[in-house]
Image (spheres, rainbow, N blue to C red):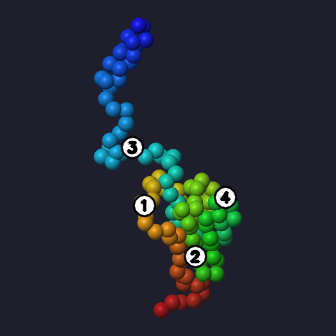
Amino acid sequence: MSEVFEMLRVLSANLGRGPATRRYPAEKRAIFPSSRGRIESVIENCIFCGVCQKRCPADCIVVNKAERTWNLDPYQCIVCGVCVEVCPTKAIAMRTEYRKPRSERTPLTHHQEPGPREGRVEG
């Protein structure tokens, strides 16, 4: 009989509290500052050294120094942040926001346009 009273006590306590979950998507949870959402490239700072490609455990980064391109497969990336830590020029950044859903699986390609060469006047 004491179990019944205990159950009624717990039931009445839970009825007074309200729901334990959020009403998503109307009520969204705040993003934590240390959250790992997505990897972004600041291609203007990239020197195409390939350190990020060598250290990536998921093998999702491809750096092509000759073509000056940097490719990331976001569906293969495990968002561990190793590439952000090892980049000598901080050309890779970790954002707290998540990527929006997509219907096709396409890698992200960043291309750096060649700037004016030293000693050469453009124009």
How far apart marks 3 and 2 lie (CA) works out to 36 Å
Q: Which of marks 4 and 2 is nearer the N terminus?
A: 4
How far apart marks 4 and 3 lie (CA) works out to 30 Å
Residue visible at 30% across and 23% down in the picture: 16
Nearer to us in this view, 68 or 22: 22
Given the current orientation, which residue lies at the most extreme front position? 1
Mark 1 or mark 2, which is nearer to you? 1
Q: Earlier in the sequence, mark 3 or mark 2?
A: 3
How far apart marks 1 and 4 lie (CA) works out to 24 Å
Residue 69 numbered mark, or none: 2
- Per the image, the residue denoted by label 3 is 29
- Per the image, the residue denoted by label 1 is 101
Disc 3 crowd, CA 10 A, few/some/many (<14, 14-19, 20+): few
- Per the image, the residue denoted by label 4 is 57
**Figure label count:** 4
Residue 37 picture location, percent across and down:
49, 54
Position of 39 relative to 9 (above/below): below
